[in-house]
Image (tube, coloured by chain):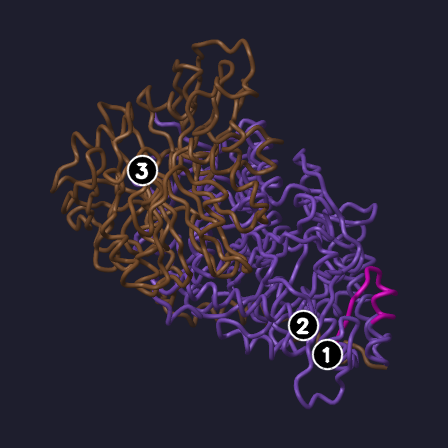
Chain colours: A purple, B brown
């Protein structure tokens, strides 16, 4: 008799790992299936020469530099996942190099002509004061925005604790306003000067939707986390987090099969009953949690006749989110020798997020985030060296004119552009000191994540399809009563913390459903 | 004072129904998405390539080139393009024993577009796979290989414009591909190939290299013969690849990169010579080490290791109890017991065989240590370069 698992989880990305950990710890017979040989999806690492690179993580705002435990930290704490955190108590630096004829250009500390150079601190008061220093007259609107974000967190808190709900009901109209208006609408209403808005909105790229499209509530929530407590990263790259969860799952009796790709979902009586692995091995289960891209699931794992009509319509109406291009650099100089002074610098050709978004419809717009992990973990590379991580984002099929045979050359062209952009914007020299380099373009992400256009972000979080409506309608949007999605395609979009959240939630739903069935 | 209270809270009320209406307005068909990213990913990284042997070329007494073309009947319509320097892992089954080997592609990347790869294989004394290939690979036979893999490639953003390539024996193969790629315009660097062979008769690709050097002024070839007096004329040296010899051919006042591919004994010798040159690490690139043998000969190998070990191995829902020699890698023990393991590079480098060591101890030679930091913390190993020191319990991914 074939084993019938309580729950089969498709994909060991962050969502799948959290789902499997939740189910296994609740005592369910749990099988986690992963097409790759290691867990984590984006949350991984790779070795080149004497460097081990972080493939995707910038920082976790769910890990706190203060006493208060952030939500990602808390999840690992609750699961008993063993991760050493390194924390960081600053937010971002935004540098906008000046173009010819810019009237407000000035020479910054690096000796570069810029129109914006904003190094923003942790702490609401400090952040607002700094913003006001850069753009006089922005203090009040900034503080006001943070007052609203504080109300939000009070309300989120109240959702789990009905006793507090009464006190927060009076804030509900404001919350409704924040959900239903964009960043731009809300900051305009708050009277924040445009240039201050641009600085305030710097993290938009982490959610992949610019100020005119993205809801104010979600943006404010994310910024609040960064500014309140700073951020953190795992000591041993994201591979540490993924292996920690792998261990949690195994220790709780769950099974994880690697190199085990689900190639088909077996239907019985109109709903999923099992899966085929690597084309030939069948496994059966009562419940399914899927950490894979819905586009891929419906086209590759199901027969069209079995796909609920609504799911197809959802694919048709949603926009594939942004893709990333990243350049990983092992440097044979220290960060001091290179002249790097910040963990995270956002270099933008224009401070306006919508203009950045428009420019990102091509393969490289001049927008580049440069990170130096040694700023947070000084000895993350051997003595005398450092590692850099450059990121840009793109929207749509920016690879459309590239043939496989031209891909290698194209990769280097993009990488060169990105490196030179950073060199110019920071007035530093990178190129001569590259000891190891790896370049990941959308095809790299498509290969490892198996998502359309290689997006790690799921579907674009536009105002009409934003986090709160997705959350409220989550169950309504699921295809079968025993099949739940988790990961970047779901409520919160991309981000490690978001994926963990959706996985834990989906796992919780399965646990609850099986308890109800009297297991 | 400005406030968000000026915004309409009521807008929220229709959001949920608007969203569902928007979904309703969609078409109930699988959307066609322009997605060249996925096209490229699949073209360059097929899970398997099914090939047929179209031609066999004798290179030397103990060396043959196999010309491989797509086996369309088995589903491979076109070959994956590759950057010169990459290898293919060959999958074979020798009397019930699944086995793999990684061989550098010796043909030009351009040839792959015309449906041709060439693997050049030297018969290794006592070598299981090379002997099997020499015995059984004939024109028309089907073979199964991986996607092109590996990191031994020229990288213009990292390497110097001038590259001294040091080859030993059949380690010439990736350099033949690189030289072709330079001549074809797919790579752009100046190559000085210093190629060590025992004698003039054992030089592989001699004519082809000469022809490439004549055709392209970015390619220069120097033969170093260990067992035969250098012939008169340019391009021949007697002895071994020493630091003095490298200096003789290296640019004087310019940075240069060293690329190195050959047998393990050559690495041991040349690595010491390279130290004398005092080059920055970034300018020295090694091809993979190759399968490691005789761990007991290593200075840091512990004493008192039992000759025979038992391994309990779980792959998916199958658990096997097997026995093997502590002189074999965990991967070899699995294969010798008829268990298919996820093997690719067999040098510790690619990480494809990443497995969980549940209990027991293994020895990993330093030259093959490419594990990730968290692997040490959570007890993960690469079976292809892990030698059992005790009985083991391991959890291994499916071979796929």
Q: Could you say which is closer to the camera, residue B76 or residue B69?
A: B69
For marks 2 and 3, give the one nearer the viewer. Answer: 3
Relative to A46, A285 lies left or right = left
How far apart marks 2 and 3 lie (CA) works out to: 58 Å
Question: Disc 1 marks which residue?
Answer: A114
Question: Total label count?
Answer: 3
Confirm whether the magenta stretch covers residue A409: no
Quadrant housing residue B238: top left
Q: Could you say which is closer to the camera, residue B160 or residue A126?
A: B160
Relative to A67, A442 lies left or right = left
In the rendered image, the vertical position of residue A66 relative to residue A223, given as above or below = above
- Tell me the element at label 2: helix
What crowding class fits label 1: few (fewer than 14 Cα within 10 Å), some (14-19), or many (20 or more)? some
Relative to B233, A180 lies left or right = right
Question: Disc 3 marks which residue?
Answer: B229
Given the image, what chain letter belongs to the residue carrying mark 3? B
Mark sitting earlier along the chain (2/1): 1
* Image location of residue A439, percent across then percent down: 50, 58
Residue lying at the far front of the rendered structure: B232
In the rendered image, the vertical position of residue A246 relative to residue A187, given as above or below = above
* Image location of residue A138, percent across then percent down: 83, 77
Q: Magenta segment range?
A: A113-130
* Image location of residue A356, percent across then percent down: 60, 76
Question: Disc 2 marks which residue?
Answer: A425
Quadrant housing residue B31: bottom left
Is there CB contact under 8 Å for labels 2 and 1?
A: yes
For marks 3 and 1, give the one nearer the viewer. Answer: 3
* Image location of residue B175, percent across then percent down: 35, 50
- Tell me the element at label 1: strand
């Amino acid at each position: 008799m074939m084993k019938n698992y309580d729950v089969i989880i498709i994909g060991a990305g962050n969502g799948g790992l959290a789902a499997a950990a939740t189910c296994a710890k609740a005592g369910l017979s749990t099988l986690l299936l992963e097409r790759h040989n290691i867990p984590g999806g984006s949350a991984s690492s790779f070795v080149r020469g004497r460097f081990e690179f972080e493939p995707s993580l910038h920082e976790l705002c769910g890990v706190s530099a203060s006493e208060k435990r952030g939500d990602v930290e808390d999840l690992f704490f609750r699961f008993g996942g063993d991760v050493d955190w390194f924390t960081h108590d600053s937010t971002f630096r935004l540098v906008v190099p000046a173009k010819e004829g810019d009237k407000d250009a000035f020479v910054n500390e690096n000796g570069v002509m810029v129109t914006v150079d904003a190094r923003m601190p942790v702490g609401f008061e400090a952040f607002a004061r700094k913003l006001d220093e850069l753009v006089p007259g922005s203090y009040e609107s900034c503080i006001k925005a943070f007052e609203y974000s504080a109300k939000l967190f009070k309300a989120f808190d109240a959702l789990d604790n009905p006793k507090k709900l009464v006190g927060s009901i009076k804030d509900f109209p404001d919350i409704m306003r924040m959900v239903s208006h964009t960043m731009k609408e809300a900051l305009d209403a708050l009277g924040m000067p445009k240039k201050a808005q641009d600085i305030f909105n710097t993290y938009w790229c982490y959610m992949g939707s610019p100020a005119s499209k993205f809801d104010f509530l979600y943006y404010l929530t994310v910024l609040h986390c960064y500014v309140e407590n700073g951020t953190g990263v795992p000591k041993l790259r994201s591979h540490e987090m993924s292996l920690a969860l792998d261990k949690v799952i195994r220790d709780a009796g769950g099974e994880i099969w690697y190199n085990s790709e689900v190639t088909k979902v077996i239907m019985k009586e109109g709903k999923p009953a099992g899966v085929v692995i690597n084309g030939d091995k069948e496994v059966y289960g009562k419940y399914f949690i899927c950490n894979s891209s819905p586009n891929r699931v419906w086209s590759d794992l199901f027969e069209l006749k079995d796909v609920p009509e609504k799911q197809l319509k959802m694919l048709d109406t949603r926009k594939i989110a942004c893709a990333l291009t990243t350049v990983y650099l092992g440097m044979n100089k220290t960060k001091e020798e290179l002249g790097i002074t910040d963990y995270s610098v956002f270099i933008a050709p224009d401070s306006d997020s919508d203009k950045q978004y428009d420019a990102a419809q091509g393969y490289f717009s001049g927008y580049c985030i440069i990170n130096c992990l040694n700023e947070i973990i000084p000895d993350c590379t051997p003595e005398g060296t450092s590692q850099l991580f450059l990121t840009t984002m793109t929207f749509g099929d920016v690879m459309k004119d590239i043939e496989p045979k031209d891909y290698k050359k194209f990769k280097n062209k993009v990488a060169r552009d990105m490196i030179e952009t950073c060199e110019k914007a920071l007035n530093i020299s990178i190129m001569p000191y590259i000891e190891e380099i790896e370049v990941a373009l959308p095809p790299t992400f498509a290969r490892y994540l198996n998502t359309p256009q290689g997006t790690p972000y799921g579907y674009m979080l536009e105002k009409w399809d934003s986090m709160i409506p997705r959350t409220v309608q989550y169950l309504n949007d699921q295809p079968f009563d025993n099949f739940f999605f988790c990961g970047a395609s779901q409520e919160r979009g991309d981000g490690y913390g978001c994926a963990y959240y959706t996985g834990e939630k989906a796992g919780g739903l399965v646990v609850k459903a099986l308890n109800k069935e009297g297991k | 004072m400005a406030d968000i209270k000026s915004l309409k809270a009521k807008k929220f009320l229709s959001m949920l129904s608007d969203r569902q209406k928007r979904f309703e307005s969609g078409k109930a068909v699988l959307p066609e998405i322009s997605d060249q990213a996925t096209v490229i990913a699949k073209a360059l990284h097929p899970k398997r390539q099914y090939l047929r042997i179209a031609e066999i070329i004798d290179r030397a007494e103990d060396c043959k080139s196999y010309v491989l073309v797509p086996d369309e009947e088995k589903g491979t319509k076109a070959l994956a393009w590759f950057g010169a320097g990459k290898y293919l892992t060959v999958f074979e089954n020798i009397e019930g024993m699944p086995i793999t080997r990684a061989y550098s592609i010796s043909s030009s990347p351009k040839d792959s577009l015309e449906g041709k790869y060439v693997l050049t294989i030297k018969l290794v004394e006592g070598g299981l796979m090379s002997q099997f290939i020499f015995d059984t690979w004939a024109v028309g036979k089907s073979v199964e290989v991986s996607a092109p893999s590996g990191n031994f490639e020229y990288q213009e953003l990292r390497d110097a414009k001038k590259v001294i390539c040091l080859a030993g024996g059949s380690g010439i193969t990736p350099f033949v591909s690189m030289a072709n790629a330079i001549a074809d315009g797919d790579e752009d660097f100046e190559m000085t190939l210093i190629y060590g062979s025992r004698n003039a008769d054992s030089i592989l690709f001699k004519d082809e290299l000469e022809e490439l050097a004549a055709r392209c002024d970015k390619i220069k070839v120097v033969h170093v013969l260990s067992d035969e007096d250098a012939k008169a004329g340019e391009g021949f040296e007697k002895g071994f690849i020493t630091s003095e010899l490298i200096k003789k051919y290296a640019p004087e006042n310019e940075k240069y990169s060293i690329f190195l591919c050959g047998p393990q004994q050559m690495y041991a010798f040349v690595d010491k010579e390279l130290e004398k040159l005092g080059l920055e690490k970034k300018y020295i690139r090694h091809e993979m080490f190759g399968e490691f043998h005789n761990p007991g000969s290593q200075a840091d190998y512990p004493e008192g290791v039992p000759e025979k070990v038992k391994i309990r191995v779980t792959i998916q829902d199958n658990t096997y109890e097997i026995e093997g020699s502590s002189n074999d890698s965990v991967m070899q023990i699995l294969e010798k017991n008829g268990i298919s393991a996820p093997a690719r590079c067999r040098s510790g480098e690619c990480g494809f065989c990443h497995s969980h060591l549940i209990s027991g101890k293994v020895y990993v030679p330093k030259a093959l240590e490419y594990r990730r930091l968290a692997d040490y913390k959570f007890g993960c190993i690469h079976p292809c370069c892990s030698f059992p020191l005790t009985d083991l319990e391991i959890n291994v991914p499916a071979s796929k």
